[in-house]
């Protein structure tokens, strides 16, 4: 285990792999320690977007080999986990706040931003078609208002997404984003 601080470049390198991020995320959920078998099971389930009881032997084996031979030793070399390969025991090092920003957040409950953007785009296309068809004098008067409303909707969706991805963001009047 390393007692030195990791540089940002080292943290980016360590957490550039999804399996390493998932392993640390799972350890955090388990209170900082677990055995290898449940970790392998959960990482394989996340990777294949299935329940942990549906993981096949091949999927489990693929994840086991890479965690055992590559990812857990690398996490241990950087002082993020204590890994005992003989006992298959993994323990998260206590100062895990340092690497929290590098982990995937809410992988299980991500907001459907693509749907919001698609809806705003559909409204824009409808507004464009209505103004292009020039249905009447009302359409030409309403077209700038439609454009303004779409711009504001895009701004609102973008701000909401930005705020949702930054839990430590301080909002006006001393509130936090969560």
Image (cartoon, rainbow, N blue to C red):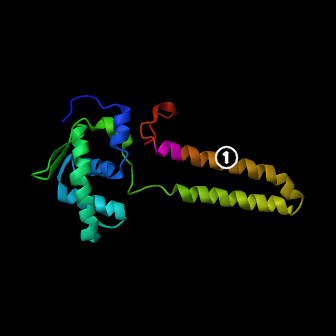
Residue at 80% across, 49% down:
144
Q: Which residue is mark 1?
A: 152
Name the quadrant of the N terminus: top left
Q: Is residue 101 above or below residue 133?
A: above
Image quadrant assignment for residue 155: top right
Quadrant in which the C terminus is drawn: top left
Position of residue 35 relative to residue 51, above or below, is above
Q: Residue at x 39, y 54 (%)?
A: 107
Q: Which residue is pictured at 66% across the width and 57% down the height?
A: 121
Quick one: which residue is furthest to the right in this view?
A: 137
* Quadrant assignment, res 139: bottom right
Q: Residue at x 27, y 62 (%)?
A: 62
| Mark 1 crowd level (few <14, some 14–19, many ≥20, 10 Å Cα) | few
- Position in image of residue 46 (x %, y %): 34, 60
Q: Position of residue 6 (x, y in %)?
A: 30, 32
Q: Residue furthest left?
A: 87
In the rendered image, residue 176 lying in the magenta stretch gets the answer no
The one of 1 and 38 positioned closer to us in this rendering: 1
The answer to if 163 sits in the magenta stretch is: yes
x and y percent of residue 84 in the render?
A: 13, 47
Could you tell whether 37 is left or right of 174 in the image?
A: left
Who is closer to the viewer here, 119 or 69?
A: 69
Q: Which residues are magenta?
A: 161-165
| Extreme-top residue of the structure | 4
Dominant secondary structure (helix, strand or loop) of the stretch shown in magenta: helix
């Amino acid at each position: 285990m390393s007692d030195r601080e990791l540089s940002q470049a080292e943290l980016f390198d360590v957490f550039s792999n999804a399996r390493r991020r998932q392993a640390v995320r799972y350890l955090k959920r388990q209170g900082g320690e677990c055995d290898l078998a449940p970790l392998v099971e959960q990482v394989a389930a996340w990777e294949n977007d299935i329940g942990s009881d549906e993981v096949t032997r091949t999927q489990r084996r693929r994840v086991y080999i890479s965690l055992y031979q590559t990812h857990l030793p690398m996490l241990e070399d950087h002082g993020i986990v204590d890994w005992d390969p003989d006992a298959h025991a993994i323990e998260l090092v206590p100062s895990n706040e340092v690497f929290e920003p590098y982990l995937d957040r809410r992988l299980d409950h991500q907001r459907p931003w693509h749907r919001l953007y698609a809806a705003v785009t559909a409204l824009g296309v409808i507004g464009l078609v209505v103004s292009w068809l020039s249905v009447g004098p009302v359409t030409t008067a309403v077209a700038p208002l439609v454009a303004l409303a779409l711009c504001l909707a895009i701004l609102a969706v973008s701000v909401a997404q930005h705020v949702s991805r930054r839990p430590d963001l301080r909002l006006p009047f001393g509130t936090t984003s969560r």
